[in-house]
């Protein structure tokens, strides 16, 4: 099979973790006899430096024609005070919108070997295995009107949380179908006691639930969900939420896995005639510029994103399983970076990559 993949290394530690993810992808292609066609592009702060735009037209066109896109991370402190259109994050939001990737899947698993890496007690996190399904193209991050207006005492900022029925229905279907293939439990997160948007969200999700009588639906307020993720994370299987809530909750859930560097993600849009998803794949973590270039970053979130790419955009479940098994084996052997608090000397980013490739 030919695998056409656009690689956007991005900023900070992005190039380091992406390099190891690409090496793993190359090893999978070699072992399973696929033809891997890689193309590189610019996004985020590095793209601004070189082209003046966080999402150059060449990158956008390459993403629209590739089978899948692998992204490292975006964001650099030097752009913190830049206008909104000249911030690295604008490139990330732009490519998500252009690809129409509306469903962000963020799996969170507490590996037995990493229980001590979590700041929570072992008995709290043990057995955690959940997926956060985050709506990705609506809500506060995209709603209009938005902006900063006026000056002096009357200066004000406006952001609009907007969702249509159609947007809620399509993300709900993704979550319910995913739950059907897991433990058949779905928790829908909202703030319906305060927000009208959440009231519509809850009503529409309840209507969609009637098409999935085999899935148990629970509605939970976002503040309670945040607390329950720490108190009793095993209660969750699939967690469905809107854009901003999902952004925050998935970062909180990183403590269950031991490090945010462990978390992969798959952002899915339309399906091709073959059933394959249009996809953007990236680790959940940020660009971590404080450790960039030091060969210290955890590449497992990026490598897990490759496993998701193989499954969702190419339908290669055996190959995806091989990557996930390699991750688990490397963890069991203790070949991990410093963020996972190894008992001995931490491995470097490239050493973790070497260990993964040896297992595959």
Image (spheres, rainbow, N blue to C red):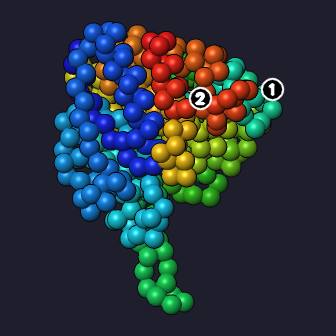
According to the image, label 2 marks what residue?
Answer: 347
Q: Residues within 10 Å of mark 2 (few under 14, many from 20)?
A: many
Q: Which is nearer the N-term, disc 1 or disc 2?
A: 1
| Residue 8 horizontal/vertical position (percent) | 33, 41
Q: Residue at x 19, y 48 (%)?
A: 58
Is residue 179 positioned above or below 102 on the image? above
Circle number at residue 312: none
In this orientation, which residue lies closer to the viewer: 137 or 94?
94
Query: At numbered mark 1, what does the secondary structure look like: helix, strand or loop?
Result: helix
Instruction: Residue at 38% x, 67% y: name it.
Output: 84
The spot of residue 317 in percent (x, y) is 40, 13
Residue 286 at what x, y percent from top left?
A: 50, 47
- Is 6 rendered above or below residue 244? above
Q: What is the number of callouts on the image?
A: 2
Quadrant where the image shows the C terminus: top left
Nearer the observer, 186 or 338: 338
Residue at (48, 74) in percent of width and height: 157
Disc 1 crowd, CA 10 A, few/some/many (<14, 14-19, 20+): few
Displayed quadrant of residue 279: top left
Element carrying mark 2: loop
| Residue 238 versus residue 30 in the image, above or below | below
Residue extending farthest bottom: 152
Nearest the viewer among 327 and 193 is: 327
- Percent coordinates x, y for residue 156 in the rendering: 50, 79
Marks 1 and 2 sit apart, C-alpha to C-alpha, by 27 Å
Q: Is residue 304 visible?
A: no
At 39% from the left and 62% from the top, the residue drawn is: 87
Task: Name the side, left or right, on which 155 lies relative to 102.
Answer: right
Q: Tell me, yes or no, if residue 227 can be seen here.
A: yes
Q: Which mark is residue 123?
A: 1
Residue 234: image quadrant is top right
Quarter of the image where the N terminus is located = top left
């Amino acid at each position: 099979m030919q695998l056409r993949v656009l690689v956007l290394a991005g900023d900070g530690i992005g190039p380091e973790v992406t390099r190891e993810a690409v090496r793993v992808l190359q090893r999978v292609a070699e072992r399973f006899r696929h033809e891997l066609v890689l193309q590189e592009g610019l996004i985020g702060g590095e793209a601004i430096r070189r082209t003046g735009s966080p999402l150059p037209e060449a990158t956008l066109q390459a993403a629209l024609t590739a089978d899948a896109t692998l992204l490292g991370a975006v964001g650099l402190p030097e752009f913190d005070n830049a206008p909104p259109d000249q911030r690295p994050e604008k490139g990330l939001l732009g490519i998500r919108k252009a690809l129409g990737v509306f469903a962000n899947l963020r799996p969170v698993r507490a590996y037995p070997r990493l229980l001590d890496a979590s700041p929570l007690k072992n008995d709290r996190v043990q057995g955690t295995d959940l997926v956060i399904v985050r709506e990705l193209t609506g809500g506060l991050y995209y709603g209009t009107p938005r902006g900063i207006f006026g000056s002096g005492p009357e200066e004000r900022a406006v952001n609009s949380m907007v969702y249509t029925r159609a947007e809620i229905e399509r993300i709900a279907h993704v979550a319910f179908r995913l739950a059907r293939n897991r433990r058949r439990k779905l928790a829908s997160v909202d703030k319906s006691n305060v927000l009208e948007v959440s009231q519509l969200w809850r009503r529409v999700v309840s209507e969609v639930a009637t098409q999935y009588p085999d899935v148990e639906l629970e509605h939970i307020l976002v503040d309670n969900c945040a607390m329950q993720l720490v108190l009793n994370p095993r209660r969750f299987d699939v967690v469905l939420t809107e854009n901003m809530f999902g952004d925050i909750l998935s970062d909180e859930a990183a403590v269950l896995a031991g490090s945010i560097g462990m978390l992969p993600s798959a952002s899915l849009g339309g399906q091709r005639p073959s059933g394959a998803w249009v996809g953007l794949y990236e680790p959940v973590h940020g660009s971590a510029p404080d450790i960039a270039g030091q060969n210290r970053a955890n590449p497992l979130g990026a490598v897990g994103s490759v496993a998701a790419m193989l499954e969702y955009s190419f339908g290669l479940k055996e190959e995806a399983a091989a990557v996930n098994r390699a991750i688990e084996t490397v963890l069991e052997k203790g070949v991990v970076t410093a963020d996972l608090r190894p008992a001995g000397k931490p491995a470097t980013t490239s050493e973790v990559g070497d260990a993964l490739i040896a297992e595959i």
